Image (cartoon, grey):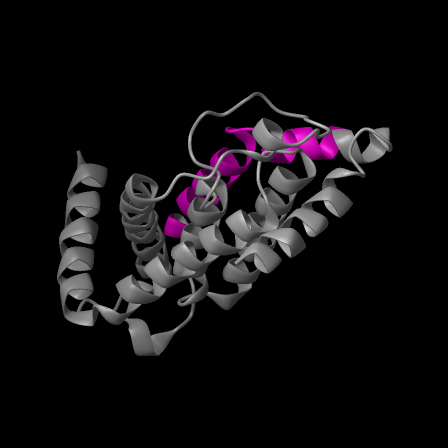
Amino acid sequence: MSFVYAIDYWLFAAINGLAGRYPWLDGPARLLLNDYFVPTVLALALLTLWFESKDAPGLRDLAGLDRTNQRAVLAATLSAVLANAVLKGLNLLYFRPRPFAQHAVNLLFYHPTDSSFPSNAAALGFAIAAGVWFYNRAWGWGLLVMAGLFGLSRIFGGVHYPLDVLAGGAVGWGSAYFIYRQTCLFNRLLGFTVTLADKLRLL
């Protein structure tokens, strides 16, 4: 395990060592790694996706309406909830100090006090992106790129080790895959959600 941590720190130092040297990198990194920009982009993407039509006859409901994108949005939302629950459990079992608590780093962020492992940001980003990807590849790939940049910026900014981001990404992707496999429960929940949304739209 010490060898893994040594490689992890070496990668962290190589990435974080670029911070503060190139202003044209620091600006976008600060934007990406903050707690609001990427989550807001992801939320707006889900909102847009919900109302976007997609031609996929195989996924039409009994009323003849295409629900592919609604499935993607619901799956992403449930995946994010599940990933957050898994993170809470892991944090109770294991605490890893942040990089800046143990090493001299180029910090572009504030000092979070929660566990560095796994990365909450990566788990959230990949849970949403993978939840969409299983149903809509075009949007999914774009959101996966955004999630990857979210995680990478956290390493660059000095608040996560690479292993934290990889573990967070695995939690997010695994949560999305688990939700994707719950077909019967998912279909019932989708029907309820769509019916409720349709009624609210009529008010």
Measured as percent of width and height from the top left, residue 44 is found at: 46, 39
Please name the residue shown 57% across and 40% down the image. Answer: 160
Residue 163 position, x and y percent, is 55, 52
Q: Which of 4 and 150 is in front in this view?
A: 4
| Position of 178 relative to 153 (above/below) | below
Residue at x 62% of width, y 24% of height: 109
- Pick the residue in front: 139 or 172: 172
Residue 169: give x, y in percent of width and height.
48, 55
Instruction: Give whichever of 110, 186 is nearer the camera.
Output: 110
Task: Give the residue at the far front of this rendering.
Answer: 2
Residue 61 visible at all: no
Inspect this view and state whether residue 155 appears: yes
**Total number of numbered discs in the rendering:** 0
Quadrant location of the C terminus in the rendered image: top left
Compared to 158, does 124 lie above or below?
Answer: below
Which residue occupies 21% across, 52% down?
A: 194
Left or right relative to 77: residue 138: right
Name the residue at the top extreme: 110
34 falls in the magenta region: yes
Q: Is residue 166 left or right of residue 81?
A: right
- Residue at left offset 34%, top offset 76%: 57
Q: Does the magenta stretch include residue 32?
A: yes
Q: What stretch is highlighted in magenta?
A: 27-50
Quadrant of the image occupied by residue 120: top left
Residue 133, position as x, y percentages in the image: 46, 63
Quadrant location of residue 56?
A: bottom left
Residue lying at the far bottom of the rendered structure = 58
Closer to the camera in the image, 82 or 200: 82
Left or right: 123 with respect to 146? left
Dominant secondary structure of the magenta stretch? helix
